[in-house]
Amino acid sequence: MSGFILKRRSYAVASYFRWMRYSSTTNKPFESIPGLSSLPVIGPIHHFLPGIGSVGPSANFFELSKILFEKYGSVVKLDGIFARACLVILYEPEHFDQVYRSEDLEAPSRPGFETLVYYRTELRKSTYDGVYGLTTAQGMQWRDFRTKVNPALLKPKLIKLYTPSLEEIAEDMVARLFRLKDDVALQSNLDLEITKWSLESIAVIALGTRLGCLEDNLTEDHPARVLIKCAKDTTDLALKLEFFPSLWKFYATSNFKKMMKTLDLQWETSVKFIEDAKRIIKDRAHELPEEDKSVIEKLIAIDDKVATVMANEMLFAGIDTVAFTTIALLYNLAIHPEIQDKLREDIRSADKSNRYLKACLKESLRLFPVIPANLRRTTKDHFVAGYHIPKGVDVVAPHEFLSRMDKNYPRATEFIPERWVVEKSDPLYYGNCHPMVTLPFGFGVRSCIGRRIAELEIEVFMKRFIRDVKVTWEGPPIQVTSKVINNFKKPYYFKFETAL
Ligand code: HEM
C-alpha cells in the first residue's frame, strides 16, 4: 500500500515538473507582458503626467483602459506603485474567466483599500476584534462573515419585503425633488439630494429606522450629512493615498491622518445610529414577525458583532453606489424620450412584472457601471494568454470598456434596453455576449452583497418617479470621472416636469 502511495506521489511530482517545464517553455515570462515601464519607487506614475507622459492624465478608467488596449493589446501590465501589487489588465473574457475560475472559489481574494485594512486590523484592532467586514477581510475570516450575512441580504424573498418602507421613502423623495426642481442649486447638488435618498433607503433596510435625510434644511452637522461626507471623503482620500505615490506606509502624511480621522468619524456616527436601532429592538416587548425585521435584527440573532460591522458597511458601501446608478438611469431616460415614454406606459399598465424597468436598469449599468472594472488578486501561478502570471498579482477585468465594444454587443455604445428582453433569435439578444463581459455587481461568491437591495431601491424609486415626472436633459453629454469609483462631472442639466 505504502509503495503504491509512494509511486503515485512520485508520478504526481514528476508530472508537476513536466507541466511546469512545459508551461515555462511555451509561456512567456511575466516580465515580458507589454505595458507601462516602471521607475524605481514611483512605478509607472510618470506615464500619467500631463504633456510628457506616454499615456497622460486620463479622465476616467474607461479612457485609460482604451488607451492601454490600443497601445499594448489584450494583455497589459502596470507595475506596482510604492510596493502595491503589480496589475495585469486582461481584455479577453476567456482569459480573466480562466484566472478567476481557477482561484479559490470558496474565498477569492480581492484586496481592499490598504489604508482601510490598516485602520481595521492595526489602528482600531481592538474595536474590530477579528471581525473585519466584507470589504477588508480575506480567507476564512471573509468566508465566515459572508456565510453569516448572505441570507439576510441576498434572499430575494426577504429583500422584497422591504418594498412598502421603500415606497414611502420614494414618495417623499419624489415630492422633495419636485419641490426643488426650479432651484438652480440642483444643477450642482443633485448628487447630494439623491444620496440623501439612498442613505435613507439603506438605513431603513439595515436598521429599520428613518434617519430623516429628506427633511428640509438638513444642516451639515446632521449625522446623516456627516455619513454622506465621510463616504465621499474616504474615496477621495483613497485615490490620493492608494493610486498616487504616497509615503503613508513610512510616516503619517497629512492625507493619511485625514483618512484615519474620517474613518473614525464614519464609525462613531454610524455606531450611534446602530446602537439606537439595537436599543429600540431590545426595548420592544414583543418579537416582530420575520418579514418586518430589519437586517440588523436578523443578524443580531446570529452574531452581534457581525450585525454591527455589516450595518456599518451598508451605511458606507450602499450610498454613493446607488446614487450614481440612479442618476445614470435618469440620464439615459432623459436623453431617450421614446424609451422613457415606453417605460412610463409600462409602469402605468396593469403588468406589474417591471420587466422593462429591469431591462432599462441593466442597460444603464452596462454603459455606466459605478465600479468600472473587477479585480482579484492571484493566490497561485497562472498560465494565460501565453504568459505566466505569478501569485500576488491583481488581475483586472475592465468590464465598462468591454461592454462598450462592438465586438461584444451590436451597437454597443447605444442605450437599448430591448437587448435584455428580446428573443434568443434577435441579433440584439444579450445572451450572444460572453457572460463575463458585463459584470456591474462583480461575480461569484464575492459579488456585491447589496445587489438585490440596490436593485429594489432603484426600481421602487424609478417606478414612482417616472410614473409622474417627465425628465429631460438640456446640456452637453454627461461626463464620467473615476475616483476609485465612478462619479459624474457637474453641472447636471436635468429638467423635471409633470408627466402627462
Ligand atoms: C447599484 C449599486 C451597486 C453596485 C453597482 C455595486 C457594485 C459592487 C461591486 C462591483 C462589488 C465588487 C464585487 C466583486 O468583487 O465581485 C461590490 C462589493 C460590495 N458591495 Fe456593492 N454595489 C452596489 C450597491 C451596494 C449596496 C446597496 C451595498 C450595501 C448593502 C453594497 C455593499 C457591498 C459590499 C459590502 C461589498 C463587498 C462584498 C464582499 O467582498 O463580499 N453594495 N459592489
Image (tube, helix red, strand yellow):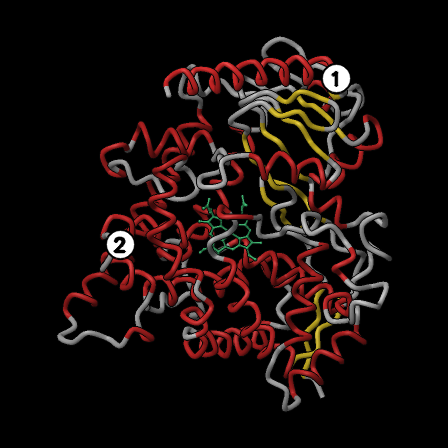
Which residue is at a point 36% across and 36% down the rendered structure image? 261
Where residue 64 appears, as percent x and y from the top left, is 74, 34
Q: Is residue 93 above or below residue 28?
A: below
Amino acid at circle 2: Lys
Position of the N terminus, as image quadrant, is: top left
The residue under label 1 is 26
Q: Is residue 215 above or below residue 69?
A: below
Using residue 369 as the reference point, say whether residue 417 is left or right of it: right
- Please tell me whether mark 2 or mark 1 is closer to you in this view: 1
Residue in front for this viewpoint, 431 or 306: 431
Where residue 112 appears, as percent x and y from the top left, is 47, 35
Query: Hey, which residue is sitting farthest top in the picture?
Result: 40
Which type of secondary structure does the marked residue at label 1 adopt? helix
**Badge 2: few (under 14), some or many (20 or more) residues near its Cα, within 10 Å?**
few
Which residue is at a point 34% across and 46% down the rendered structure image? 145
Residue 83 appears in the rendering: no
Which residue is at a point 73% across and 19% down the rendered structure image? 33
Residue 116 position by quadrant = top left
Residue in front for this viewpoint, 162 or 18: 18
Residue 178 position by quadrant = bottom right
Residue 351 appears in the rendering: yes
Which residue is at a point 38% across and 41% down the rendered structure image? 142
Where residue 419 appears, as percent x and y from the top left, is 77, 65
Q: Is residue 138 above or below residue 77?
A: below
Query: Hey, which residue is sitting farthest bottom in the picture?
Result: 350
Using residue 252 as the reference point, say whether residue 275 is left or right of it: left
Which type of secondary structure does the marked residue at label 2 adopt? helix
**Badge 1: few (under 14), some or many (20 or more) residues near its Cα, within 10 Å?**
few
Residue in front for this viewpoint, 218 or 371: 371
Q: CA distance from mark 2 to mark 1?
A: 58 Å
Numbered label attached to residue 272: 2
